[in-house]
Image: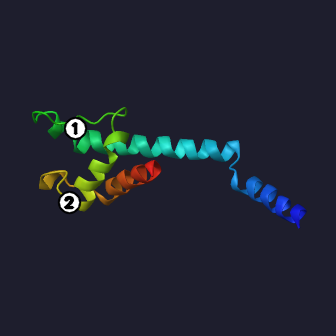
Amino acid sequence: MKSVIWIVIVISNFISRPSSKELQVIGNQTKTAKKEAYLVLNTKCNFCHSVKKNRTIFSLENMDGLAKVIEFQVFKKKKMPKGRKNKLSSLEETQLLNWIKTLD
């Protein structure tokens, strides 16, 4: 019985660990999602935030820490981005959501 349990534990540890190649793919997908999201933030958000007093300018360095606020304002409250001409396309929404999912 002990040997069966030991075999199950060994097999489950072996199966659940991603290989270094898999980790590299995941890392690259995360970097790509972040870059795509940053392009959306930079083109749809930063131009307005830069002219408003006391507004945060989004950068690659600070955007992960602001993800929950961005998600709340864009997807839950639907307050951002402001203006009819500045609406997010479905692709841009998907890019932001993909990036936010990588942070969970």
In this view, the mark in front (2 or 1): 2
The percent coordinates of residue 38 (x first, y second) are 35, 40
| Residue lying furthest front | 2
The residue shown at (33%, 34%) is: 62
| Residue lying furthest bottom | 1
62 w.r.t. 94: above or below: above
Viewer-closest of 33 and 16: 16
The residue shown at (11%, 34%) is: 51
Viewer-closest of 47 and 75: 75
Which residue is disc 2 drawn over?
77
* Quadrant of the rendering where the N terminus is positioned: bottom right
Query: Secondary structure under badge 2?
Result: loop
The percent coordinates of residue 29 (x first, y second) are 52, 46
Which residue is disc 1 drawn over?
46
Viewer-closest of 35 and 14: 14
**Residue type indicated by callout 1:** Asn
10 w.r.t. 64: above or below: below
The residue shown at (32%, 56%) is: 93
Residue 87 in sight: yes
The percent coordinates of residue 101 (x first, y second) are 43, 54
